[in-house]
Image (spheres, rainbow, N blue to C red):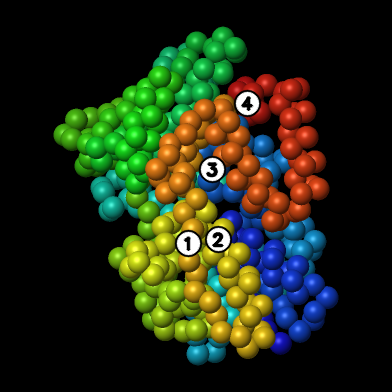
Amino acid sequence: MANFVVVGGGAAGLELVTRLGKSFAGNKQHTVTLVEPSGHHLWKPRLHEIAVGSFDNELDAVSYVQHSVCNGYQFVQAGMSGLDRESKTIVLDRDVDGNNTLSYDYLVMAVGAVSNDFKINGVREHCLFLDSSEQALLAWEQIKKMLQSSTQQRISIVGAGATGVELASELAKLNQQLSRYKMGGSLAVTLIEAADRVLPASPKCMSEKVQRKLEQQGVTVQLNAKVQSASHHQLIVNDTAIEAQLQVWAAGVKCADWLANLDGLETNRINQIRVKPTLQTTLDDSVFVIGDNAECPQPDGSMVPPRAQAANQEATHLAKQFKRLIKDKPLQPFIFKDGGMMIALGHDYAVGSVMGNKLVLRGRWVRNIYDTIFRLHQQVLFGWGRVSALMILKRVKCLLNPYYKGSLS
């Protein structure tokens, strides 16, 4: 009998327990448990849409309780606060059925990553982050209040990676769409990036196309702009004050600080847990790590990048490897296959790079591909039948409702 415990219900963790739960359906010898503090799963690459009120929580959110019952795994609503590798138990941050520990035979860490404030003075206190659905919903509540003003409201976004770029574009689209309400106020969006171009990890020609589109949408882009400090409604950037009613931090990536003290497991400078090519930790073969919180080496000496597609591939790979594991077969190494990058710039436009970043595409049909990636994630969770029904329902709602579902009153 094998007891699999997965910590973290993001894209990687939820896809893994879904695949394992279905694989072991009817087999009482193996149990699968998901440990996650939230009650609902929302796909992290679309948090920027939640922050702007354009994400359909009713149709696209996943209840862990309901999903676990339908897919053969157990759900424990709690966070992880510690690990005892010798006794093979994890410590929970709350009591569950009178106990705050959980035993495992094989543990999978899939807790993801968060934005890196680089310990800049005032950032943690005066900027909003978009690392969770709760934070994204908080941002939307503040933006709704700003939209009720009769004067122009300013929003500063720090970090022109995927999250920052998509959020800036979505806000610009919101500004255009809400003109139908004939409200007196408007939004002025400024995107601040320390590098010399937006999307610094993408091909240069892709960065140029994305920046051009952002500027066409009315976003002010500031490059080579280093944030020195943050205070209430103000950022100091290159010794110049930038005023804004809302300040969003979307720069850098790191993992939670508590991962650096997880019973001696090896971590790097941004708290990622070091793993072998088999996704097992370097010091304990019973502990696996997938997603953004893993530092996984590749044959060419590089590391798997912290992207959603890498997390999805790792979940698929590990589900297959666990089947081999219970049959006493050797584990195979994980090899990341880069499918390129796609950035949404509003609901009708996207820019993407494919073929090893040799070809850059743009347009409405690229946005359709972007949406298909999300539907593929849902397909793993629900199957094509329900996904097709969700797509039809969403189309009907779009025809009947205003573009933005959130109440502005």
Image height check: is 225 above or below 68? Answer: above
Mark 3 Cα within 10 Å, few/some/many (few <14, many 20+)? many
Circles 1 and 2 in contact, beta carbons < 8 Å: yes
Residue 404, labelled with which disc?
Answer: 4
Quadrant for the C terminus in the image? top right
Of the two numbered discs 4 and 3 on the same chain, state the one appearing first in sequence: 3
Q: Residue at x 68, y 50 (%)?
A: 378
Q: Label 2, on which residue?
A: 313
**Residue 76 drawn at (x, y percent):** 67, 68
Q: Label 3, on which residue?
A: 47
Q: Is label 3 in a helix, a strand or a loop? A: helix
Q: Residue at x 49, y 58 (%)?
A: 337
Q: CA distance from mark 4 to mark 1?
A: 37 Å
Mark 2 Cα within 10 Å, few/some/many (few <14, many 20+)? some
Mark 4 Cα within 10 Å, few/some/many (few <14, many 20+)? some
User: Quarter-wise, where is residue 74 in the image?
Assistant: bottom right
The three-letter amino acid code for the residue at tag 3 is: Leu
Q: Is label 1 in a helix, a strand or a loop? A: loop
Of the two numbered discs 4 and 1 on the same chain, state the one appearing first in sequence: 1
The three-letter amino acid code for the residue at tag 4 is: Tyr
Of tags 4 and 2, the one toward the viewer is 2
Circles 1 and 3 in contact, beta carbons < 8 Å: no
The three-letter amino acid code for the residue at tag 1 is: Phe
Q: Label 1, on which residue?
A: 336
Which is more toward the observer, 213 or 400?
Answer: 213
